[in-house]
Amino acid sequence: MKLQITINGNAYAVDVEIVEDEESASEPGAVPRRTAHASGGSHPQSHGGAWDSEGKVCRSPLMGLVIKVYVTPGQAVEANELILVLEAMKMETNVTAPRAGTVKSVNVAPGGSVKLNQVLMELE
């Protein structure tokens, strides 16, 4: 999964690999292990969210707050279009569309908190 983070005004593309299986993720008290590799500069293909392989369901890549939602159900979006912004620990994560499509549902609102892997939105 690729994320774009901004630190002190500098954008960085980050490749994040979630190293856990379904079974360990559901165990009470389990802490997911993650590795991240950063590369300098912005990355136009960065999607920020954890999209499924078909680019239909977006799950939160982090636990945090919804800062801004730019889309509504029924709205057409283009590939790489900014659809929402999440914040965690004073860092913002832009979530962009992985492909062109129509927004099927938006399951979050500005000011709301999100959990790791919570469904944020769906595309048709």
Image (spheres, grey):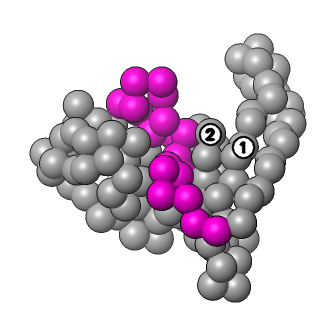
Q: Position of residue 79 (x, y in %)?
A: 32, 47
Residue sitting nearer the eye, 52 or 41: 41
Q: Residues within 10 Å of mark 2 (few under 14, many from 20)?
A: some
Determine the secondary structure under disc 2.
loop
Give the residue at x 70% y 77%: 7
Left or right of 36 on screen, residue 90: left
Q: Residue at x 62, y 39 (%)?
A: 1
In this figure, which residue is indicated by the disc labeled 1? 16
Residue 43 in magenta stretch: yes
- The residue closer to the viewer here, 24 or 39, is 39
Please tell me which of labels 2 and 1 falls first in the chain: 2
Q: Residue at x 74, y 36 (%)?
A: 17
Q: Residue at x 48, y 28 (%)?
A: 52
- The answer to whether 46 is drawn above or below residue 28 in the figure is below
Q: Do callouts 2 and 1 mark residues in contact (Cβ within 8 Å)?
A: yes
- Residue receiving disc 2: 1
Q: How many marks?
A: 2
Range shown magenta: 41-59
Q: Main secondary structure of the magenta part?
A: loop
Q: Is residue 113 shown to the viewer in this render?
A: no
Residue 110 in magenta stretch: no
